[in-house]
Amino acid sequence: MSSGRTIVVGITGGIAAYKAVNVVRAFVLRGDTVQVVATPAALRFVGKPTLEAISRNPVHTDLYEGVAEVRHVAIGQSADLIVVAPATANSIAKLAAGLADDLLGNTILASTAPVVIAPAMHTEMWNNAATVANIATLRARGVTIVGPGVGQLTGSDSGAGRMAEPDTIVAAALAALAAAENGRASSDLAGKRIVITAGGTREPLDPVRFLGNRSSGKQGVALAEAAAARGASVILIAANLEVPAPTTVDLRPVNSALDLERAVTEAAVGADVVIMAAAVADYRPVTVRADKIKKDDTGDSLLLELTRNPDILAGLAARKAPGQGLVGFAAETETDPDRLLALGRAKMARKGCDFLVVNRVGWSEGFASDHNEVRVLDRRGDIVCEASGTKMSVAGHILDLIS
Ligand code: C5P
C-alpha cells in the first residue's frame, strides 16, 4: 500500500536519534516512501543498517555521493514533507542560518516542502539565547516545531529538552502536511491565544487524601502541544497530569476544581478560545480536615458529606466575550452510540458552549489510553466532525474545526 508521498526524515547527531527509528517506521507503515538523510554524527548514535532496513531505502549521508544524479538537490525536490528528528542545537542553528555544508542542509534548502523539526538537547542549550532566537527565526519562516517535552534527559538529570515522542512527531508532521495540501499555513493559529485545561481535579479530604478521577491529561496535553505547534500562544491549566507538559506552553498547575476555576477564569480574559478538556470533579468534600482522618476516630463506616462544585464551563459560557470560542468535553460510559449522542446533545444544551467533544470512557477506554474516538457537536447538536486515532491526531481534527 503506498500513500504516494515521499517523506524525508533528517536525523542529526543526538542520543534521541535511536527514537527516530520509530518515526521512520511509522511513516513506512502508513505506506509513505521514506528517504533518510542522516548526518555523520547521527550515525554514531544509530546504525545505517537499522535505518536502511526500517526505511526500506538506502540512507544518504555524504554530500559527495551520487553527484552525477545531483542528489544534494534531488532528495529535497522529491520531498512532500521534511521531518528533522532529533534536531540538535547545532542543526537548528545551521537551519536558521540557511547553511548548506552537509547533505541535510542542502536537501532542506532545495525543497519547498513543509519542514517539521523535533528539537532535542539539554535544558541549558534549549534555553540559551542563541537557540531561542534560532527557534523564533524558524517559526517565523513557517517551520513547525514539535516539542521538546520536559522529562528525563540522557543522564540522571531532567528538564526541558527531551525530544517529543515519535507518535507526537508523526502526528504533528501529518498535520503540517495536511495544512500544506489544503493550502493552509501550518501556523494557522499564529496570533491566537488559546487556553486549555487538562487532567483531572483532586478534591482534598485531608492533608494526604483526595477524591479524584482517572483522567491522565493526555488529550488536553495533545491539544496544547498541537495548538502551540500551529503557532498559537497556549496557556495550559494542568490538573495533576500523568504525562509531561510541553515546553512550548505557559503552564499553570492546579489541583482542585476551585483552583481550576480561578486559573481558567483569569486566563480566559482576552483568550480567543477556551478548551475545557479537564475532568472536573462535580462534588468536593464539605470540610477538609486539618489532620489525617483516623480509623480509630471514625469506626467501621465513614460518611463523607459532599457539596456541588461550580460548573466552570457553563459559567464561562454565560460570561464569555463576543467572538470567544468555547469547547467542552463530554466523557460518558454509555455504550449505545445513539444514546451517547443524545447525552451529548443534552449536555450541549445545558453548557452553552460552541463545540462539545463527545467520547466514551470506561475501565479501559478513554482516559489513560493513547487513542481516542470522538464526535464533535455544534451548538445545534449537529455532528460536525468524527475522528478516531491517536490523541494527537484527534487534537488535530478539533483544532481544524476551531481554525
Ligand atoms: O457535566 P460534565 O462533567 O459531564 O461536563 C463535562 C465538561 O464540563 C468538561 O468540558 C469539563 O471540563 C466541564 N466541567 C466544568 N465544571 C464542572 C464539571 C465539568 O467545567 N464542575
Image (cartoon, helix red, strand yellow):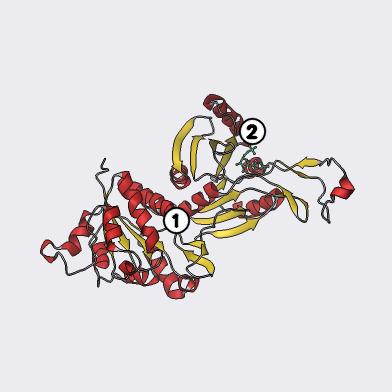
Left or right relative to 387: residue 84? left
Q: Earlier in the sequence, mark 1 or mark 2?
A: 1
Dot 2 surroundings within 10 Å: few (below 14), some, or many (20 or more)? Answer: few
Disc 1 marks which residue? 165
Amino acid, disc 2: Arg
Most foreground residue, 96 or 315 = 96
Which residue is painted at 34% across and 64% down in the image? 46
Disc 2 marks which residue? 350
Gap in Å between the C-alphas at discs 1 and 2? 37 Å
Mark 1 vs mark 2: give the one in front.
1
Q: Which mark is residue 1?
A: none
Q: Residue furthest right?
A: 297
Which residue is painted at 42% across and 74% down in the image? 130
Left or right relative to 138: residue 63? left
Dot 1 surroundings within 10 Å: few (below 14), some, or many (20 or more)? Answer: some
Can the viewer see residue 231 in this picture?
A: no
Q: Element at badge 1? A: loop
Label 2 within 8 A of ligand 1 by Cβ:
yes
Most foreground residue, 70 or 230 = 70
Amino acid, disc 1: Glu
Q: Element at badge 2? A: helix
In the rendering, at what x and y percent does residue 103 appear?
A: 24, 67
In the rendering, at what x and y percent does residue 122 appear?
A: 47, 71
> Against 159, is 365 above or below?
above
In the rendering, at what x and y percent does residue 34 appear?
A: 27, 53
Which residue is painted at 19% across and 64% down in the image? 72
Can the viewer see residue 65 in this picture?
A: yes
Task: Quadrant for the N terminus, please.
Answer: top left
Quadrant in the picture for residue 386: top left
Quadrant in the picture for residue 304: top right
Left or right relative to 206: residue 360? left
